[in-house]
Image (tube, coloured by chain):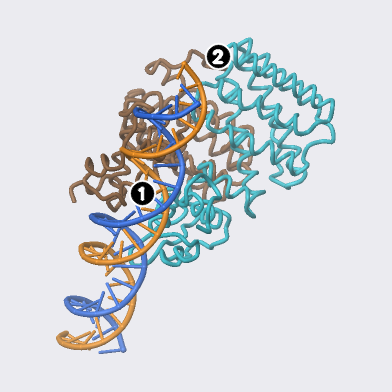
Chain colours: A cyan, B brown, C orange, D blue
Amino acid sequence: MDAADGGGTGLHAGVLDRLGALVAGGGLAPGTVLRADELVERYGVSRTVVREAVRVLESMGLVQSRRRVGTTVAPRERWNVHDPRVIRWRLDGPDRDDQLRSLSELRRGVEPVAAVLAASRATPEQCGELVGAVMDMAVHGRSGDFEAYLEADVRFHRTLLAASGNEMLAALDGVVAEVLAGRTRHHLMPARPEPAAIRLHGDVADAVRSGDAGAAEAAMRAILAEATAAMADVVGADPDPRT
Amino acid sequence: MDAADGGGTGLHAGVLDRLGALVAGGGLAPGTVLRADELVERYGVSRTVVREAVRVLESMGLVQSRRRVGTTVAPRERWNVHDPRVIRWRLDGPDRDDQLRSLSELRRGVEPVAAVLAASRATPEQCGELVGAVMDMAVHGRSGDFEAYLEADVRFHRTLLAASGNEMLAALDGVVAEVLAGRTRHHLMPARPEPAAIRLHGDVADAVRSGDAGAAEAAMRAILAEATAAMADVVGADPDPRT
DNA sequence: CTCTTGAATAAGTCATATCTATTTCGCACA
DNA sequence: TGTGCGAAATAGATATGACTTATTCAAGAG
């Protein structure tokens, strides 16, 4: 009655979210032990609720609960780093920059493939959605409305991932959205969106529509190369701009 | 007392594994409702255990439990398709071929990036491990020992992913291992491993060692192109061999 | 025919009792 | 003093009963 929400609905979701953010955010060093009644007291809920939250955290690999010992915080290597909630918790914590770099690199691999696949699988509706998103990007880019520009950008990439016809790629839409939003929030965007970037998005849309997988991939790689270069200036990532 | 193991240790892990396999395997159509006491009876465990299992399944997006209604099987779009257990359950079910295709496509995006990153981040130990794995592939390829060849192949790719220095890529090692193993199990391998494939693996190792990101990526893409072509013959995937 | 209201229902939550695995410590024996 | 076996203590694992709350559905009023 005093540790209500925080995530979804129900008490357990609240505890899950708070504990998860604490662990995934690095607030507790690996090896730290938490006893059940300690958590009961800290969050003011019953054992049942704590157990359920701990079980879910265990299923994410964040903790491991052993008899007679308690639930111990697991080392990072065991974490399900692809779990959407783990990603969100880490983005909210001190790992934010590292996490964004990891996600950017993942995106650099995923999106070109999505472009290739979309070229042979995108539906007419999806092609239209892509073109529409590019148009919105152009409009809001010119007017300098960052929020609207970002929204259109996210819509473009989300649609492309969906058009790949591969659910495992499509499920990464949250990752892409997070990276794009993070870039805007960190002011890694130029004062006015590059016309070149918008043109490249248009190239991808055109290539997908005409079924030209090679062109779609090339244009998408160009988009990502630009993003990588812009990010390297600030986060000081690895000095390898590639081709 | 009668629905013991199945996954990890503990009753809840057993129920989780059985129920998860049932849902993720497609045994229950989306929208199907399961009531708590029904599960209690079916698996012969207490409500506590059922609750914990259902909570974990809910955290994977496989089901959603609502008051007064029961826990309903969620549509596939909500599933955490990147969760290792969901992947395993689907690989064990009728979706196996589709799942392998999705994983292969994901791999096709991820591994080239891993190669690029590894070229600038691999430690000397990792370079040595790569070279050693290639040598083992050559030896067992010549002797026709499929098991040992597969093992060396997995070791190579696993090491490369780890060498990328990106935990989100490294965490996909299970995916790659599953795809490679599936290919062997489905007899998609030529009677005798292609010397060309082994040479390409060697090229990747050399490029990574010398820090040549471009060459590493090119060789890795060649490996994947070959694998894609071989798979397309049997599973009848999309007719787009790309460049 | 529609809207409101209340009863039925099933999950959610809490509290408690019991079981069991595991650790730890002490005692015996070498 | 060192090794090993065993008993006791600990803390999670499981089971169960009682109670709460949200949701649905149907009956009745308008």
Q: Which mark is residue B52?
A: 1
Cα distance in 3D space between marks 1 and 2: 43 Å
| Viewer-closest of A155 and B214 | A155
| Viewer-closest of A62 and B202 | A62
Q: Element at badge 2?
A: helix
Tell whether B52 sits left or right of A111: left
Q: Chain of mark 1?
A: B
Q: Chain of mark 2?
A: A
Crowd rating for badge 1 (residues with CA inside 10 Å; few <14, some 14–19, many 20+): many
Classify residue B208 by image quadrant. Answer: top right
Residue at figure coordinates x 64%, y 49% from the top left: A98
**Residue A215 percent coordinates (x, y):** 66, 17
Residue A93 to residue A187: above or below: below
Q: Are marks 1 and 2 in contact (CB under 8 Å)?
A: no
Tell whether D1 sits left or right of B129: left
Residue at figure coordinates x 77%, y 40% from the top left: A188
Q: Name the residue type under label 1.
A: Glu
Quadrant the C terminus of chain A occupies:
top right
Residue at figure coordinates x 50%, y 47% from the top left: B128
- The residue at which mark 2 appears reads as A120
**Residue A139 percent coordinates (x, y):** 80, 22
Tell whether B3 sits left or right of A121: left
**Residue A231 percent coordinates (x, y):** 73, 41
Residue at figure coordinates x 44%, y 53% from the top left: A53
Is residue B84 visible in the rendered image? The answer is yes
Classify residue A106 by image quadrant. Answer: top right
Q: Name the residue type under label 2.
A: Ser
Residue A39 to residue A178: above or below: below
Q: Element at badge 1?
A: helix
